Image (cartoon, rainbow, N blue to C red):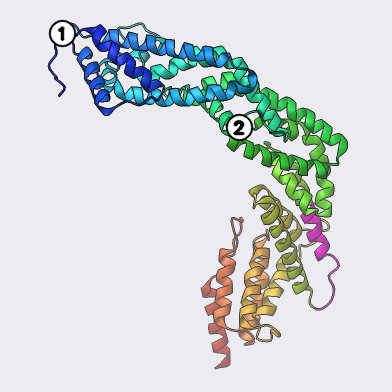
């Protein structure tokens, strides 16, 4: 049983046993539970030794042991040929990082009672404490110390070789060649640059960025810049976009395997060739080439402001299609032709925006602007906009008893769809004037299909004005007023 009472302790005798156990822990050697418990007791005894605690000496000896161990590993790893260097490094890293975590548990009393008490608080650092240590000199817990030593004594001396080999493996993968090292090894080595600094809350990625990421960004930029130029010389823009999308998919998969950044890819294969892609947008929109438009959107949405040209082109295209659909309407059923033709165009491009552009609000806005132009179109400033009158007549034809060929459900659907046109009308007062006249005639001449339908339609109109300046102001009182007049006339 461990004695909690402070007493005189022979440091060398205790340290000899601790040193042997620490070495086994770092190499993942087998340790009996009995000896593990004894080392806990030995570390405690040194920390509370009488008359002077020996925690400081224990810390320094442990640090020296860890440094010598990692330096020996560095010699072994650096002696490897390039084809074996990554696997040798990763093998030792797996053992050592696991050992460092276990060692932190073994030294828990030293960490809690010695290291924690000597650490500077955040307030000390911010406002100035009694000690003048900088952040690099701060005392680390044993597990943190072990990782810090790995970084200083192994990664830094080998960083150039490690980075060069990792970049070569990633390039081989991009070229569909077999890599010199397994995926798990490549990923493990890259992650070690991050994991070794996980205890640093504010700079855990600093080593990864300096040792590997900066070089990877440069390498990625050069690779895709060269490839983009080569592809454009051999392919048209349509084929180029498909190849780039395939590359994007590959890079996403590569990101899950190796954790490389992808921003250079976007710059070199998309942003640098934005003018070429934009130049093809008008023809693709005019031809409604859905495959190419979908591909272009996938690429351009990754670049700030990239889709603006497509949005502008689509807005103008929808406007022209809407105007074509409503020009030269003839016959007795012009209101129905007008409304239903526009609804058909609207639905077509709503489906396109949903399927090709993921309901991107920039494209939805383009559709709205295009339809505002079409529905409020005047040939000249002297001409009157016919949309309010035509829509009112269309609604009138549906709400009359004489509606033929449609059941009640179909009539309700058409009335509901007509709100799509109504919301784009600027001058709702004009529409209301025409609608009121038709409503009065239906009620007075007893041609209305039903009062429920009349009131339901007015509620739809009141709710379908959107954020327009002049919303529909028809009230239920107006309907009842017409009804009372009708009753008076028929008495």
Q: Main secondary structure of the magenta part?
A: helix
How crowded is the residue under tag 2: few (<14 C-alpha within 10 Å), some, or many (20+)?
Answer: few
Q: Is residue 440 left or right of residue 300?
A: left
User: Considering only vertical position in the picture, is 436 above or below 307?
Assistant: below
Q: Earlier in the sequence, mark 2 or mark 1?
A: 1
> Between marks 2 and 1, how big is the CA–CA gap?
54 Å
Indicate the secondary structure of the residue bearing disc 1. Answer: loop
Which disc is residue 8 wearing?
Answer: 1
Decide which of 44, 318 is in the foreground and name it.
44
User: Considering only vertical position in the picture, is 335 above or below 238?
Assistant: below
Which disc is residue 182 wearing?
Answer: 2
Indicate the secondary structure of the residue bearing disc 2. Answer: loop
Question: Taking the image as drawn, is residue 403 in sight?
Answer: yes
Decide which of 122, 54 is in the foreground and name it.
54
Q: Quadrant of residue 78?
A: top right
Q: Which residues are magenta?
A: 317-332
Q: Position of residue 305 (x, y in %)?
A: 69, 38
Q: Is residue 374 left or right of residue 424?
A: right
How crowded is the residue under tag 1: few (<14 C-alpha within 10 Å), some, or many (20+)?
Answer: few
Q: Position of residue 161 (x, y in %)?
A: 62, 16
* Residue plotted at (80% across, 40% down): 240
Which residue occupies the extreme bottom position in the image?
Answer: 491
Q: Quadrant of residue 49?
A: top left
Tell me the quarter of the image containing the C terminus: bottom right
């Amino acid at each position: 049983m461990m004695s909690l009472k402070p007493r005189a302790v022979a440091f060398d005798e205790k340290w000899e046993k601790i040193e042997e156990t620490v070495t086994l822990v770092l190499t993942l050697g087998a340790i009996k539970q009995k000896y593990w418990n004894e080392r806990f007791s030995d570390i405690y005894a040194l920390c509370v030794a009488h008359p002077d605690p020996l925690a400081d000496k224990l810390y320094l000896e442990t640090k020296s042991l860890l440094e010598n161990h990692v330096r020996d590993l560095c010699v072994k790893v650096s002696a490897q040929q390039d084809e074996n260097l990554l696997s040798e490094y990763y093998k030792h890293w797996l053992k050592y990082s696991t050992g460092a975590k276990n060692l932190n548990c073994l030294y828990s009393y030293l960490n809690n009672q010695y290291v924690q008490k000597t650490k500077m608080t955040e307030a000390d650092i911010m406002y100035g404490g009694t000690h003048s240590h900088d952040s690099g000199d701060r005392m680390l817990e044993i597990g943190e110390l072990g990782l810090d030593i790995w970084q200083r004594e192994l990664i830094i001396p080998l960083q150039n070789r490690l980075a060069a080999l990792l970049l070569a493996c990633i390039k081989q993968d991009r070229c569909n060649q077999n890599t010199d090292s397994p995926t798990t090894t490549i990923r493990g080595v890259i992650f070690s640059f991050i994991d070794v600094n996980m205890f640093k809350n504010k700079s855990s990625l600093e080593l990864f960025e300096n040792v590997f990421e900066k070089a990877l960004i440069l390498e990625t930029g050069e690779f895709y810049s060269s490839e983009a130029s080569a592809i454009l010389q051999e392919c048209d823009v349509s084929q180029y976009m498909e190849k780039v999308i395939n590359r994007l998919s590959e890079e996403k998969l590569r990101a899950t395997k190796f954790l490389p950044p992808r921003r250079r890819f976007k710059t070199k294969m998309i942003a640098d060739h934005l003018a070429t892609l934009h130049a093809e947008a008008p023809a693709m929109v005019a031809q409604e080439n859905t495959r190419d438009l979908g591909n272009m959107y996938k690429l351009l949405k990754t670049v700030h402001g990239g889709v603006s040209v497509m949005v502008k082109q689509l807005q103008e295209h929808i406007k022209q299609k809407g105007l074509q659909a409503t020009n030269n309407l003839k016959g007795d059923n012009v209101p129905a032709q007008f409304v239903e033709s526009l609804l058909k165009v609207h639905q077509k491009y709503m489906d396109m925006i949903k399927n090709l552009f993921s309901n991107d609000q920039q494209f939805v806005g383009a559709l709205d602007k295009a339809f505002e132009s079409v529905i409020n179109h005047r040939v000249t400033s002297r001409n009157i906009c016919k949309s309010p009158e035509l829509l009112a007549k269309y609604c009138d034809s549906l709400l009359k008893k004489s509606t033929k060929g449609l059941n009640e459900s179909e009539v309700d659907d058409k009335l509901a769809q007509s709100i799509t046109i109504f919301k784009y009308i600027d001058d709702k007062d004009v529409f209301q004037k025409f609608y009121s006249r038709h409503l009065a005639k239906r009620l007075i001449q007893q041609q209305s299909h039903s009062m429920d339908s009349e009131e339901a339609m007015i509620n739809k109109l009141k709710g379908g004005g959107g954020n327009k300046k002049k919303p529909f102001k028809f009230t239920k009182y107006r309907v009842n007023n017409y009804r009372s007049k009708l009753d008076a006339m028929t008495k």
